[in-house]
Image (tube, grey):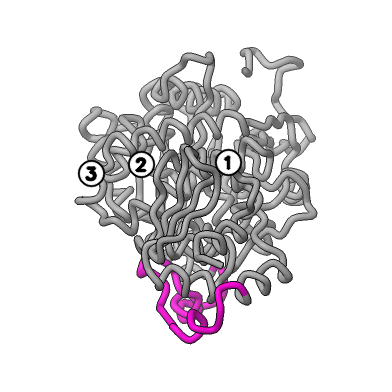
Amino acid sequence: MGLASIFEKIVGPNSNIAFMAYDGSKAGPDGSDVTIEVKSPIAVAYLAQAPGELGLARAYVSGHIDVHGDMYTLLDRMWNITTNDLTLAEKLDAVRALGPKPLLMRVPPPPQEMRRSTLARLGSRHAKQRDAEAIHHHYDVSNRFYEWVLGPSMAYTCAVFPRQDATLEEAQYTKFDLVARKLDLKPGMRLLDVGCGWGGMVMHAAREYGVKALGVTLSKQQAEWAQKAIVDAGLQDLAEVRFMDYRDVPEGGFDAVSSIGLTEHIGKDQLPAYFSSLYRKLKPGGRLLNHCITRPTSTEKTINKGGFINRYVFPDGELESVGHLTTQMENSGFEVRHEENLREHYARTLKFWCENLDDNWEDALQEVGHGTARVWRLYMAGCIVGFERNKVQLHQVLGVKLDDEGAAHFPLRPSIDWP
């Protein structure tokens, strides 16, 4: 059996994907618009050592597999392997088909892979130093690279599209404004934005609502970029971003807290402490808006330690169901007042990011290197498939800290239209 046929067996014979390998073999339908090319024996070694998602990712990131055609189309056709990985029996069949030689060829993972041993030296999962390293691994790639991928908004979270033809910038503005309206921001209020990224929510609250806003991030590059953007926009009297763990913020008495894309990094066991910490930061009547990626049910694993996302993109990242998150919010004292799922919006957001990366591909290669650029192309295209097929969701949950009399200080009906 030729190598191309073996790879076809691993990916799936009915996927409408063509295969070709360095041994001259070919498989799959003629004329397919997507082809996987196996370029060297190292690709085979990666598959033998880790059959399925991780082995394929290692071979692609390191350049020993090439994809000819659209990455999203490829992953959409092989979505079962990219989201569920292979069963143990399928992995054993793949290793048998590859033969004994690749098993003897020990090749290290690409340098872009976060090794478990590296994180283990920094303490238990979600210890402060370990969290800082995990955030550094993903967010300190290059501000310039992020500018190319994210566009002018520098918002690395799900946008909210008010119309089918809305631009990414319109949708990111709509997202920040939706958060601001759910929090009922007004001039003179104080907002804490935890995991603030490049300061998009902080600047929006200050510029559009006259709010005094503090953002904190564990990425030094993000904090530096955001502080410069704040000064350039003339918002330094109202807005501030600090390079700081949210657990170390000394101030309290905030009118509102926004958490947009941080909860994924917190960890299931740390959620009670996380929500309790944010609860303590609020005044009575203050609101929390928690915006994060979730699992569709509570039956899935919260973390796939051997998966591509955990190894290459979000080390120690964990996703819970929205039911678990709301329970933890309630147990911490919050009354949950509103919740919505925006998963289709995240698929659309990711498509814009993928297009931006493709448009700036050559510059991206020069800035971050082939391996890192390939990680991003693979990761973002795969996430589109995940959101479209309901493997992951994006939820916003709004909670309030009741006053001593049990009052929520909410109108009987929202005074604004929440899309």
How far apart are the two marked residues, 3 and 2, measured between alpha carbons? 24 Å
Q: Which of marks 3 and 1 is nearer the N terminus?
A: 1
Q: Which of marks 3 and 2 is nearer the N terminus?
A: 2
Residue wearing tag 2: 198
Task: Decide if residue 292 is in sight here.
Answer: no
Instruction: Give the label on residue 318, or none.
Output: none
Q: Magenta part of the protein: which range?
A: 97-126
Q: Position of residue 261 (x, y in %)?
A: 52, 44
How far apart are the two marked residues, 1 and 2, measured between alpha carbons? 31 Å
Residue wearing tag 1: 76
Question: Mark 1 or mark 2, which is nearer to you?
Answer: 1
Vertical side of 179 occupied by 12: above or below: below
Q: Is residue 105 magenta?
A: yes
Q: Which amino acid does label 1 sit on?
A: Asp
Q: Which of 76 and 322 is in front in this view?
A: 76
Vertical side of 267 occupied by 397: above or below: above
Q: What element carries label 1?
A: helix
Q: In this view, does 308 lie to the left or right of 229?
A: right
Give the quadrant of residue 245: bottom left
Give the quadrant of residue 317: bottom right
**Cβ atoms at labels 3 and 2 below 8 Å apart:** no
Q: Which amino acid does label 3 sit on?
A: Glu
Question: Mark 3 or mark 1, which is nearer to you?
Answer: 1
> Which secondary structure type mostly characterizes the magenta part of the structure?
loop
Q: Is mark 2 on a helix, strand or loop?
A: loop
Q: Does the magenta stretch include residue 103?
A: yes
Residue wearing tag 3: 362
Q: Which of marks 1 and 2 is nearer the N terminus?
A: 1
**Cβ atoms at labels 3 and 1 below 8 Å apart:** no
How far apart are the two marked residues, 3 and 1, measured between alpha carbons? 25 Å
